């Protein structure tokens, strides 16, 4: 299969929409990361997504829409909190897990009676979904478990020849996946952190819980949301984390002097490593989020023995970056949290 790289003009978007309607797969930009899209109502098309990504069937997909009406057409029962959440955060980087209608194939939801739905803010994504006239099921457009794509070239690095087309809409603004909020229970639960923060959600909803990252992992039951595996978003090169201080990062690199080490480097930190990716100003979590995956992918291409990165705090979007890095490294800290202080 030849993967077409399409511009984000009207003609190309109409062509991409035709591919979706015909049961094909198209990668496209959102404000978070690039998604790999197929007709959410076509079980065969959705199965192609799993095949292209080599994604296990127990990991559900997010369905993307271009209007409130399209979103509500997927939901069996609109939750009481829906109106306030929609007014505050949609379109935007928030995914809601809600009871699904039977028209949504079970392959989309990993066999569960809920579906994850999102109304992206990216104009190219909205135009593609609207031109298709269909809700589009779309996980991140990369091989399963690998670093998510924030540019068309990242998509092609993982999926060239495995999908029909990618619409090149430039780099994604936010750079980490959407917040996932489960509304199917008595208390809303954040299953995955993102640009819509716990603090913002609590202003709207009051009581909101964070999912326990150490909760037992039972893939045979089907996960309630994407991004809940213990290891995910991972470069092929081993990734180790340090505390979020310059001394901690310097010490970790010095301890690995005999290895070829690369690092994500906050601006202004004096670091000596074989390869460095200038990440951005420490504490500017929006900038660091937007450059996180590009940095990990670049370092992964440098034939290193190890990648080292400092771990942000839970503040704002720092919580989402922290969550991604902990999963990408499978929690590998140097030294373990609470140990070495430099």
Image: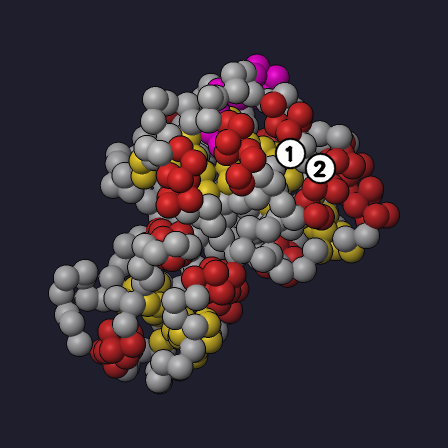
Residue sitting nearer the eye, 103 or 94: 94
Give the dominant element type of the magenta stretch: helix, strand or loop.
loop
The residue positioned 34% from the left and 22% from the top of the image is 186
Residue 194 x %, y %: 45, 48
Where on the picture, by quarter, is residue 273? bottom left
Q: Callout 1: 10 Å neighbours few (<14), some, many (20+)?
A: many
Relative side of 195 to 74, left or right? left
Question: Pointer 1: what residue?
Answer: 65
Q: Callout 2: 10 Å neighbours few (<14), some, many (20+)?
A: many
In the image, residue 135 above or below residue 75? below
**Residue 297 visible, this angle:** no
Residue 218 x %, y %: 32, 30
Q: Secondary structure at mark 2?
A: helix
Where on the picture, by quarter, is residue 272? bottom left
Relative side of 278 to 328, left or right? right
Residue 204 x %, y %: 43, 36
Q: Quadrant of the C terminus?
A: bottom left
319 within the magenta span: no
Disc ID at residue 107: none
> In the rendered structure, which disc, 1 or 2, sits on the residue that comes first in sequence?
1
Relative side of 136 to 334, left or right? right
104 within the magenta span: yes
Question: Mark 1 to mark 2: distance in Å?
Answer: 6 Å
Per the rendered image, the range of residues in magenta is: 96-106
Residue 21 x %, y %: 76, 31
Residue sitting nearer the eye, 255 or 338: 338
In the image, residue 255 above or below residue 145? below
Contact (Cβ within 8 Å) of mark 1 with mark 2: yes
- For the rendered model, the colour scheme is secondary structure
Relative side of 74 to 96, left or right? right
Question: Pointer 2: what residue?
Answer: 129
């Amino acid at each position: 299969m030849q993967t077409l790289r399409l511009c984000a003009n009207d003609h190309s978007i109409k062509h991409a929409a035709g591919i979706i309607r015909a049961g094909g797969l198209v990668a496209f930009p959102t404000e978070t990361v690039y998604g790999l899209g197929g007709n959410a109502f076509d079980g065969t098309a959705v199965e192609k997504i799993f095949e292209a990504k080599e994604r296990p069937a127990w990991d559900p997909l997010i369905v993307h829409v271009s209007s409130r009406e399209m979103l509500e057409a997927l939901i069996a029962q609109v939750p009481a909190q829906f109106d306030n959440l929609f007014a505050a955060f949609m379109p935007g980087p928030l995914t809601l897990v809600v009871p699904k209608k039977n028209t949504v194939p079970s392959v989309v939801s990993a066999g569960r009676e809920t579906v994850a739905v999102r109304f992206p803010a990216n104009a190219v994504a909205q135009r593609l979904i609207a031109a298709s006239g269909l809700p589009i099921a779309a996980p991140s457009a990369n091989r399963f478990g690998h670093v998510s794509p924030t540019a068309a070239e990242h998509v092609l690095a993982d999926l060239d020849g495995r999908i029909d087309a990618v619409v090149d809409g430039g780099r994604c603004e936010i750079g980490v996946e959407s917040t996932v909020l489960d509304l199917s229970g008595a208390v809303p639960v954040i299953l995955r952190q993102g640009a819509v923060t716990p603090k913002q959600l609590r202003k709207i909803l009051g009581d909101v819980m964070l999912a326990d990252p150490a909760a037992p992992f039972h893939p045979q039951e089907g996960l309630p949301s994407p991004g809940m595996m213990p290891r995910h978003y991972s470069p092929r090169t081993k990734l180790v984390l340090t505390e979020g201080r310059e001394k901690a990062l310097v010490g970790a690199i010095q301890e690995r002097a005999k290895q070829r080490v690369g690092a994500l480097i906050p601006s202004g930190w004096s670091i000596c490593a074989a390869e460095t990716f200038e990440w951005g100003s420490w504490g500017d979590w929006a900038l660091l989020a937007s450059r996180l995956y590009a940095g990990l992918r670049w370092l992964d291409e440098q034939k290193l023995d190890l990648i080292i990165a400092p771990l942000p705090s839970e503040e704002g979007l720092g919580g989402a970056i922290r969550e991604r890095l902990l999963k990408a490294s499978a929690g590998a800290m140097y030294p373990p949290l609470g140990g070495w202080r430099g």
